[in-house]
Image (cartoon, helix red, strand yellow):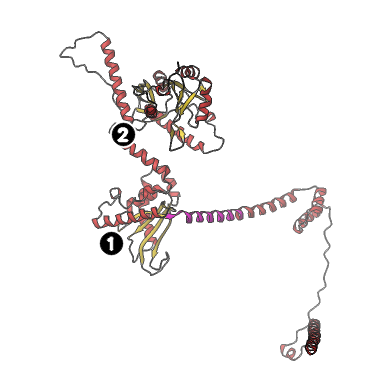
């Protein structure tokens, strides 16, 4: 007998789905087993992907049972799916109008609360204690003596050895979970977080190792796998089935995510940190740094700030926030610092760099040996400038505006310098340092100019040495060749004069060509020079003088011809003009 839609007895839940699936693919999978009334696929708004599970509503319960018997435990899109009847939180009402509310309740049952880690852990520890009590009750009851000092030992929480595991397949049992993690080291316990209403685990669990080293190695392995997959996702042709880390931390077709467990008191901090990370991931304008260096006075090395300075800093922070809201092209720089309240007299850019260098020395000393070696080779201060009253950054003898900018190589270095030098006393003034605003359009133009300039310089650097190397190779090849026929062919095909000369020299050296005879040139003795006084009045026109005179004569003749042609043209024009005027006068006389 067919039931109505409101009873929802033909409702099936599918778990462990691929996150990129849509409703059409799920419909194709379940359509052969009966009439589908509705498909509910909960989506993740952050990445537009499904949450790994879906609800399929059949017309009858028989159709739902048939789909479960055929599809449960089968592989679909390279994943083992779990198909079961949907278990409601409360008894479904008979009216159709309340069907949507029931859907929401079912979805809430299947959500995995990954943030509240410690809440699940407390439940787990209670369950372990109950199991121990039941085991003790099942045995023969022994009346303890009053003098006995024996105490029951419970599983204690240890931050260093306890781990929280996410993304566990719903097909995984506690035995499989325990066996899998025991292969990486000896464990005290391994438990899955169960849902008391559905009597199924939530896709999360806890593992406690006996040694800290084993727990630490598991966390590091999970970090490596996550970073590897994040890097490879962006590359074209990436296939997770053929990856190097395929067998690492994979159980029943799902890659496990392992993180250290935390105390219940620290759950709030974990939530705040995770929310901040998400904001930073999607914050392309770096708005989380808007008030950095202005209102976070507790983070400064010199945290003793006067009340008047606090109000001043608050005004700067509010103005900065308004500029960001008004202009969407503005963003907060990660590496460029803005310095206010600088000394206006007897303070140059070199002095500014020296103050930053002293702080950078402390920063380098706090690092490890390998990092120290890298930082010492690196140029940490890229640019530093002070603005003067005339509006420029280069002025000698002019008063500064008390404003300056410093560009650092890295965000971590810039953040360290900002917190170390903020409110620092410098020649009777307290520095105010924050991250500067920058226009994204200007930065793009600057980057394009740099790219074009770098391409031009690379072409010049690469092309010139190639030409030199090629000529040297040719010279070496001609000097090494001893085959006269080959050299003659090269001489016949060659077009450059220099190369021909080198080939001829080689042929002469081999005896295949005669050397050109040197022609002896008779040199006439120069006539005796007469004194300058005698030559002053005597200047005989030589051959050069005759040629010059001929050229001058030709020029004169040419000019004369042009003049005559002009006169002829003028006379012709006058005749034509007279004839035209005569015609006009005759026509007027006739009238």
Residue 159 visible = no
Indicate whether 245 appears above or below 509: above
Residue 509's mark?
Answer: none
Residue 399 location, x and y as percent?
A: 36, 68
Residue 439 visible = yes
- Residue 434 located left or right of residue 303: right
Location of the N terminus (image quadrant): top left
**Callout 2: 10 Å neighbours few (<14), some, many (20+)?**
some
Q: CA distance from mark 2 to mark 1?
A: 45 Å
Location of the C terminus (image quadrant): bottom right
Indicate whether 462 appears above or below 197: below
Residue topped by disc 1: 428
Residue topped by disc 2: 267
Q: Residue at x 31, y 34 (%)?
A: 267
Residue 499 location, x and y as percent?
A: 75, 56
Q: Residue furthest front?
A: 591
Q: Residue at x 32, y 60 (%)?
A: 341
């Amino acid at each position: 007998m067919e039931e109505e839609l409101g009873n929802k007895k033909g409702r099936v839940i599918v778990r462990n789905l691929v996150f990129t699936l849509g409703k059409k693919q799920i419909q194709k999978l379940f359509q052969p087993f009966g009439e589908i009334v509705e498909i509910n696929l909960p989506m993740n708004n952050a990445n537009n992907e499904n949450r790994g599970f879906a609800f399929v509503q059949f017309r009858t319960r028989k159709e739902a049972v048939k789909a479960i018997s055929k599809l449960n435990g089968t592989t679909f899109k390279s994943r083992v799916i779990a198909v079961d009847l949907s278990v409601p939180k409360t008894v479904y009402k008979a009216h159709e109008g309340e069907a949507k509310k029931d859907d929401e309740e079912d979805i809430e049952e299947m959500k995995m609360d990954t943030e509240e880690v410690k809440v699940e852990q407390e439940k787990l520890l209670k369950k372990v204690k109950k199991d121990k009590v039941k085991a003790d009750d099942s045995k023969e009851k022994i009346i303890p003596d009053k003098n006995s000092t024996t105490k029951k030992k419970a599983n204690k929480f240890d931050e260093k050895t306890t781990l929280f595991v996410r993304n566990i397949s719903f097909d995984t049992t506690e035995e499989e979970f325990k066996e899998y993690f025991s292969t990486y080291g000896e464990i005290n316990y391994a438990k899955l977080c169960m849902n008391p209403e559905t009597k199924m685990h939530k896709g999360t669990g806890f593992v406690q190792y006996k040694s800290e080293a084993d727990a630490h190695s598991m966390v590091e392995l999970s970090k490596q796998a996550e970073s590897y997959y994040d890097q490879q996702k962006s590359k074209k042709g990436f296939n997770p089935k053929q990856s190097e880390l395929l067998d690492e931390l994979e159980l029943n077709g799902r890659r496990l995510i392992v993180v250290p467990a935390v105390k219940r008191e620290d759950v709030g901090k974990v939530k705040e940190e995770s929310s901040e990370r998400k904001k930073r991931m999607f914050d392309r304008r770096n708005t989380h740094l808007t008030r950095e260096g202005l209102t976070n006075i507790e983070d400064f090395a010199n945290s003793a700030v006067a009340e008047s300075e606090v109000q001043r800093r608050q005004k700067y922070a509010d103005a900065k926030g308004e500029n960001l809201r008004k202009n969407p092209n503005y963003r907060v720089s990660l590496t460029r610092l803005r310095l206010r309240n600088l000394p206006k007299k007897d303070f140059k850019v070199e002095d500014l760099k020296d103050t930053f260098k002293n702080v950078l020395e402390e920063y380098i000393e706090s690092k490890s040996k390998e990092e120290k070696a890298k930082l010492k080779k690196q140029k940490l201060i890229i640019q530093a400038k002070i603005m003067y009253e005339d509006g420029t950054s280069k002025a000698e003898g002019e008063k500064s505006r008390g404003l300056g900018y410093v560009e650092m190589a890295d965000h971590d270095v810039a953040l360290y310098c900002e917190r170390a030098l903020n409110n620092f006393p410098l020649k009777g003034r307290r520095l105010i340092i924050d991250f500067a605003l920058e226009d994204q359009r200007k930065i793009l133009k600057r980057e394009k100019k740099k790219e074009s300039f770098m391409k031009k310089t690379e072409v010049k650097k690469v092309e010139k040495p190639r030409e030199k190397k090629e000529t040297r190779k040719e010279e070496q090849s001609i000097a090494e060749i001893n085959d006269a026929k080959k050299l003659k062919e090269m001489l016949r095909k060659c077009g450059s004069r220099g190369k021909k000369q080198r080939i001829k020299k080689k042929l002469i050296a081999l005896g295949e060509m005669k050397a050109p005879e040197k022609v002896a040139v008779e040199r006439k003795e120069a006539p005796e020079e007469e004194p300058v006084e005698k030559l002053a009045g005597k200047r005989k026109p030589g051959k050069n003088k005759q040629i010059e005179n001929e050229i001058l004569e030709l020029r004169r003749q040419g000019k004369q011809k042009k003049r005559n042609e002009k006169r002829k043209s003028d006379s012709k024009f006058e005749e034509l003009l007279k004839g035209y005027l005569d015609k006009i006068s005759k026509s007027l006389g006739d009238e």
